[in-house]
Amino acid sequence: MNALSLSEVTVDLGPRRILERINLVVTPGSFTCLLGPSGCGKTTLLRAIAGFTPLSSGDIRLGERSITELPPEKRHTAMVFQSYALWPHMNVGDNLAYPLKLRGIPKDERTQRVATMLERLALGGFEHRSVTQLSGGQRQRIALGRALIIDPPLLLLDEPLSNLDASIRRSLRGELRQLQKSLGLTTVMVTHDQEEALQMADQIVLMREGHIVQVAPPASLYQQPADLEAARFLGVDNTVACSPQDPSALAGAKTLGFRTREARVDVAPSVNALVRRGQVTECVYTGDGYQIGVTANDQTLFATARTPVEAGRFVTLQVPESALIPFGPDHRYMPSLNAQEHTA
Amino acid sequence: MTPSRLLTPLGLGLLLGLIAFIVFGPLLNLALWAFAEQWFYPHTLPTVWGFDFWARVFRPRAGAWSSLTNTLIVALSAVALSMALAVPAGYALARLPLPGRHAIMLLFLLPQAFPNLPIFVNIAAIFHQLGLTGTLIGVVLVHALPGLVYAVWIATAAFAAADRNLEEAARNLGATPLRTFVDVTLPQALPGLLAAAIFVFLDSVDEFTGTFFVGAPEITTLPLLMFNASMGGNYQVAAITSLILLIPSIGFMLVIERFLKADVLSRIGR
């Protein structure tokens, strides 16, 4: 049985179609990321699941039960908002206890469960603090705790980490993932950060302009993006037109994509690699090396080098075959011969 | 130091002093009159000081107590009436997709746009036919009219400033729409609603024209008492009455400063 299934979910906002026939299945206990650029409809999809956006057509099922017609309060999904949405007129303890109060749980048990939750969030004894006094990371945890305290069948996260500092964000990613795993919580998270999605998700749903482009586990999404545009969103920042001597050319690839950090200008030539000769136009220090801009055939490509390369020099840019992502004439991903052998 | 540099703080000080005199001068005069028992022309200050007139004003038969009670009853009822209308109206105007929202907001401003004397004269004529002149209900209605303008506009701003995500979080975690309104929306909008209520209260306490046409002579409020006293040349009674009227205004200033936050003010009229 699926924890959550969407079938033909369509959402219109006035004359504009926001989501077009979305089909998606989420397995129990899994972590799904809705990934895409802003305006792709990922937040709308999450809000539709929570019940804040009415569907024009389609069906949403939680387990076997259809929740399409239910108001938000009857869906039992728990959502963590991007702004955390903690109630400023209640203290930390009251914020956490409110969902329990709504469920008619007696005061003693509420106090008990709030204390347990705060311990689990490493915020023990914070009951009487005002939520306005908390730091961003602490607020985020309280918002998460408020959602978790009702043992929801489905946890919805709307860019929960985007308002935090980079360092806190990184540590919270791990914490959140661990908590999710230990509780076996079915989770759907919205993010525009591909790194976050790749690190946290079991399954990534890549969205664009109200459609689902690709549903895949992180590794296959990263290595085999559905099309050129998806690849660009996933950090494939170089594309070249395929020429006859390039690898994969035989298979019929028209375009080859690769990531800057896979391309080198300072390695010995090898067979079965993409090779382009060009002139260095820029050299930028990036911390763990140098990013080199190379102009080859009137096109700027980017590569990495361990040592700086002065502008104006001619270099040979090389990308190993394994790092090349082939695309067909329709700009869609084209499985290479090697990959087909692997899967066979 | 150049003379111009010296002049600047001096000029600024003089300017501030002048403004302070313009603002506080009349109030000081009021305070002097309230405690003066004898003050004749050539003297700069009263010759005899005392609380004699205070005792006289608050004598049972002098009418100060009854006008004070009337003022309070009318003001509190006007607050209750306008808030009872302004809370649902403000919520609807701020939150629901109402067609012609701006037209409705402007409609609430109309009573303020016309000179109020003709309006009150006409209201008095209508109320006379309905038998409402000279009654407390009539005076409350006439006070709620201008009060409603402030109340609806400020309540709309207060509800518009309340964060919708907070309501959605409550709905999401199991609260019904009504429960969400009571537990989350209302506390969010409370400072603004409180300010609106105080606005209506103050407006009512100071109201003269409407009371004069609809209530007098049966219903006397403090402003009417003050008017009568100063018309009769009794400056002490007028000064004491206006000092009493000053109390809610100062209280209001403090509350406004404490509760009406910039994010609410910035949404008034939107």
Image: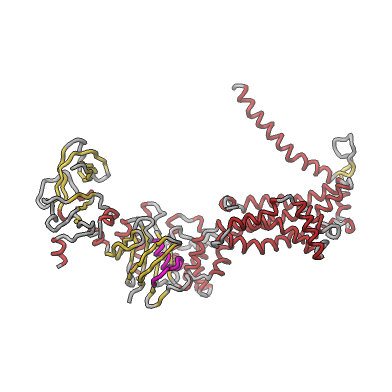
- Asked whether the viewer can see residue A144, the reply is no
Please say whether residue A43 is one of the residues in the magenta stretch. Answer: yes
Q: Position of residue A267 (x, y in %)?
A: 14, 45
- Residue A52 in picture, x, y percent from top left: 46, 66
* Horizontal side, residue B55 vs residue A113: left or right: right
- In the image, farthest residue toward the left: A271
Q: Considering depth in this image, is B172 or A109 the residue closer to the camera?
A: B172
**Most foreground residue, A161 or A32:** A32
| Residue B190 image offset from top left, x and y in percent | 61, 59
In reply to whether residue B125 is colored magenta, the answer given is no
Location of residue A231 (image quadrant): bottom left
Give how far across and how far down residue A198 sits, in percent: 29, 59
Q: Is residue B31 or residue B137 the one in the foreground?
A: B137
**Residue at the front extreme, as displayed:** A15
Q: Residue furthest top?
A: B2
Which quarter shows the N terminus of chain A?
A: bottom left
Residue at image coords 33%, 74%: A2
Say which quarter of the image contains residue A216.
Answer: bottom left
Q: Which residues are magenta?
A: A42-58
Relative to B263, residue A68 above or below: below
